Image (tube, rainbow, N blue to C red):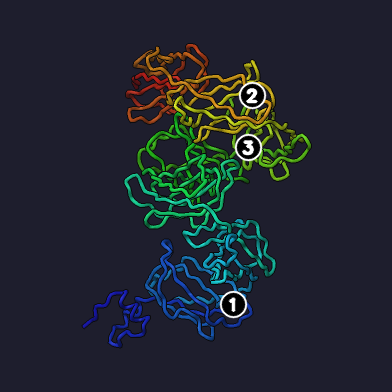
Amino acid sequence: MMHRVSARLLLAALLAGILPDAAPRVYARLIPCLSGFVRTSGGSPVAGADLDFFVSGTGEKLITPGDNTDATGFYNVCVLPGVYDVTFAPPPGTRLLGRVFPQLDLTANVGRELNVTLETGFVMSGSVTSASSGQGVEGVDFDADVVGGGRLFTPDDNTDANGDYRVVVPAGLFRFRYEPVPGSRLRGLEMDSVAVAGDQLIDVVLEDGLLLFGRVRSGSGAALAGVTVDLRDGVTGEKVFVANNDTDAAGDYSVAVPAGTFELRYVPPRGAPYVAVSIAGFQIGADTQRDQVLQDGHRVTVIVRDFNGEFVVLADIDVKENPGGAKVFTPHDRTDSAGAAELALVSGSYDLRIDPPAGTTLDRVELTGVAIDADTTITVVLPEVARWRVTGRLTDPAGTGLPGVQVDARLSPSGQSVFIPSPFSDAAGDLDLSIPGGLYNVHFSPPRGSRSVGIEIANVAVAGDSSWGNIPLQDGLLVTIVVNSPDGRAVANANLDFYVGASSSREFVPHDRTDAAGSTVVALLPGEWRIRVKPPSGSGYESLTAGPAAVFNDTTITIVLRQRISSSPPAVSLGAAFPNPFRDLATVGYEVGATTDVTLDVFDVRGSRVRVLRRQEAVSGRFEASWDGTDDRGRGVPTGVYFIRLRTSLGDATRKVLVLR
């Protein structure tokens, strides 16, 4: 009679050495074993090396008794069938490096032989102490990331009771991280670009921080585990290292952070259907509790291929609301090895911009009016474009190179921006750009918070490899612009235009949109400035012009918008389409009562945008636009009812039109 034994009980019996002799031989074939020898690069056996098995994909660690090598370096470990990440850790105190073998397939129910060689590395050692107490800190986790690569496997990498640590790493360039135990008031420490070419002694002092803590839940109230809590410096935008910054199974987090003003981010795991959140101007001056709800969204997978059909890795996807143009925070917006980026978006209409990675001849693709109302997969093919190499150097008035200046080339006269890989000046201020041929107005935008004044150079021809030579930027004054509603609330995504004195010619000023805190910082030359503020579409506020304001020192200018009075006559009107119904061409007239941004689109009955008719800034007056019954790709639309929608900061209007085929 055959024994009925579960696989788990069988494995437990096998590992314990108590499998009954009467068990059929078929059971042995159910249990795959991994075996082999662990040796040094010189061929010597490594005794006492420890093997660990982790389920690939989940990271769950298996209990595997007897998983150390014997005196000859031999091991034999039996597990349930599966795919595992297997680590080999040398015994403590050696100069040997650990090794990881990802995704070992042990599903075939047969044994597998794997002989492993452990190389010799360099010893990184030292002590970790608290700045406030001067005592060693126990349990600090040491991590080493290869610059340009991934995480290095470093066994036995926690500090002991005295705060001492000892790890072995290979030669190379690394980022070292020191992370105290979760819940500690001690701030973690990150050391960038550590070159390793020999043994090193590195002592570390950890500063006390303030506690930022709370709970993250979904819109339906479910606890969200694995959400990453990140900080960016509120002025420079640089990432602030935060240790142990993922939420636990209950959605809780508690991290030690510095005092200051930051952009606070909540980033759900890649592929999760929850919408990430970014909060600008978040102030931390004491222990702070912040609970956060992440909206339930739709999974949007963007697959990017080149013109040959190959997947494009590290393509960058930017998403903006349509209409309005407000940028949407999408943290997982670079494509992986399968050419896929996974976003989470709430229902709505969006504009997507897909930029290829640097170093390719691929060009940018822009999609407008993409309707999202369910989980969606979007496939994009990036075209090839001929490019020319353009060099130059950005300097301050003293001739010192200016790093981080962004170059934006816009075709003249259309104003369309073209994709430039690596569009920033390097640490010495040098530019090395790849630009398609054309005639451009070129914008040079220093980083936000810089005193260097951005400039525009008009009608720059690119027709071959060339040099722009030395490009000097003047020093200016830092002006903080704050835009509020009448009741003191911040107005985000307001667009600012700048004019010198009574001039009607708009000056190029970078960073001309307010952030979530309703503010921005710009660099201006001394003088009198007028500032035209255009609130986001649908905000209910009127555009206005402030000033002239005298700017002769660093200063802050606060602008309070006026609420649009609903009882006043309409500031915009949209006439009926003519003819209606139509087959080939319909014309529609519209009128605006003041200078405003105009968006004129055609939508179908499902609310999906079919055609962009107009995007422009219009002064007060009457205008006309025509629609030939095609979509944005030039394809004729089928017979049916469509809606022409006018949107402005002054108000919106919609007209129905019937297409006959």
Q: Which circle, 1 or 3, is nearer the viewer?
A: 3
Seen at 41% across and 77% down, the residue is 78
Residue ranking furthest to the front: 133
Is residue 145 visible in the rendered image? The answer is no
Which one is nearer the viewer's eye here, 105 or 431?
431
Q: Position of residue 376 (x, y in %)?
A: 39, 42
Q: Which circle, 2 or 3, is nearer the viewer?
A: 3
Which residue is tagged 3? 449
For label 3, count other residues whose C-alpha is less than 10 Å away and answer few (under 14), some (14-19) or many (20+): some
Q: Position of residue 531 (x, y in %)?
A: 58, 22
Per the model, the C-alpha gap separating discs 1 and 3 is 49 Å
Which residue is tagged 1? 93
Task: Give the mark, 2 or 3, whose residue is nearer the N terminus.
Answer: 3
- Say which quarter of the image contains residue 246: bottom left
Task: Give the mark, 1 or 3, whose residue is nearer the N terminus.
Answer: 1
Which residue is tagged 2? 507
